[in-house]
Amino acid sequence: MRGWLIIILAFGLVLGPAAFSSAEDPPISTEALTVDHRWIDIFQSDDRGSLEVIEYIFYNNTGTDTFNGTVYAWVPTGADVISTCCGNAPNMACRMKEGGYMLCFDMEHLDENIVHGVPFEPSTFMSYFEQSATITISGTSQNYSDSSSIEVTVGRESTLGTYPEITGEGIHITTRAVELGALATIQAGMPEKLAIIQPVLNVTNNATTNETVELEISGLPEGWNGLFLNETGNTVDNVTVLSNESRILYLHMQVPSYILEVQLNYFLSVEGYDEPNGSFVFGKEFLYDNGFIESYVLILPDDNLTTSGGLRIITNEWSEADERMWFVVVGTDIEAGESATMTILWESPLDLALIALVAVVIVLSILIVFLLMRKKGMIGPKVEKEEDEPEVKAKPDKELSLEEKKRTLLLAMKRLKKDHEEGRVPDDVYEELHANYKKSAIEVLKQIDEQK
């Protein structure tokens, strides 16, 4: 289970609003978001009577529409939303912040299947992927001034050229950036800022005197920041350029992160769990496009699991730490409006109802024979020595130890490597997941060392 992991760095779906909401419900706006990654952990109770589900949803703004700050997620009918990351508070979820910190927010039902919430403080929404801005770099000295414009696009690779040729007396601000990009990598605790540092500015002094040039950036969208760094990496807001010489400056751009990880917790009651032969279907309706889905399903040793709708089982084995069968289920490129299921099946080789009936018949037969024999004096009452009843001790709730957490993480890394080598997990997904597991393992090892 990843419930105790600090991962980051999102784990929602888009059927049209008419499919889930009544005429009185507000419209659902999901076009602005996709789900890059979704991790679903499912843990079956000892009596099969309930399932604990944790979804880690990594929302990503597409850039096609402005994100209004509300996120949606689809949950099965009867789901009881309880946030373990917020002290088991009802109708809440949490979002991961930089450094593994979590921020709780309301996540309430819009209708029977859709929950929604606003994970950010007012007017502090995430930026969107492929958001562009044209910024202007201005330089002013005592005698001259000049400016140059640069295009910056979130999520793009930087495109660099050469500095243009300079002619004419004065101060010249030039750039070799055709376009700058701000990029991010998924890691434990997604950064709240994406950054890029590029040596793209050339301040040239073609005057006959030395000039001190004051620098300024304009045109930055709200939440964006821009800084100038000199050759030694120090922040500067002005630069002195000798006559007929040039200075190269670094532009340090920071923009808000376009990745949002939400941890959503809920519990499901399983109907018919006490029947000798039965099944329970865990279904998902997807409100957003989903790039990659990974699910860990932990069920009782005598039960089995099947999947449908683009999900496939890539491995299953016994987990000693959880005393459960551990199934790993994945899916890729599942589009909004599609659905998928994971079905838990159980069966008993004998009919429990028939066994109960036979037991009743046997008991009644023994009782009749006993009464007849007693009536004929063949047997009499016996006094048996009472024995002390054994002390019944409550079994404590199972809690994973640090050693068990370490073993589970190392096992997950080993399995992920095997799946990657056998071509079941793409290179980019392998690198991201391996980094997550490695960071979490390091944290667990640190905790183990602290307890020694």
Image (cartoon, rainbow, N blue to C red):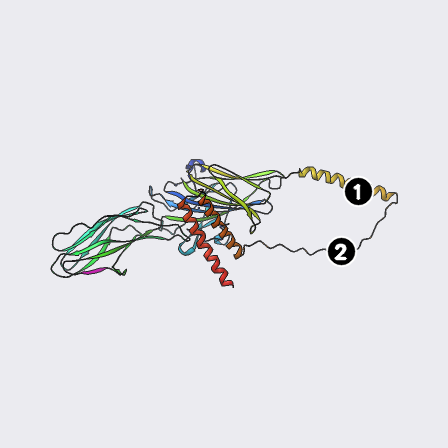
Q: Specify start and end residues of the magenta stretch as a single range.
A: 237-246
**Frontmost residue, 386 versus 424:** 424
Q: Earlier in the sequence, mark 2 or mark 1?
A: 1
Give me the C-alpha separation between circle 2 and circle 1: 24 Å
Q: Identify the residue position indicated by label 1 in the image.
A: 367
In the rendered view, tell whether residue 376 sits above or below residue 192.
Answer: above
Q: Identify the residue position indicated by label 2 in the image.
A: 387
Q: Amino acid at mark 1?
A: Leu
Q: For the residue carrying disc 1, how many other residues have a C-alpha within 10 Å: few (<14), some (14-19), or many (20+)?
A: few
Is 239 colored magenta in this rendering?
yes
Specify the quadrant of the image occupied by residue 51.
Answer: top right
Residue 226: horizontal and vertical position, in percent?
27, 54
Q: Amino acid at mark 2?
A: Glu
In the rendered view, tell whether residue 205 sits above or below residue 14.
Answer: below
How many marks on residues? 2
The reply, left or right, for residue 371 in relation to residue 201 is: right
**Frontmost residue, 182 versus 127:** 182
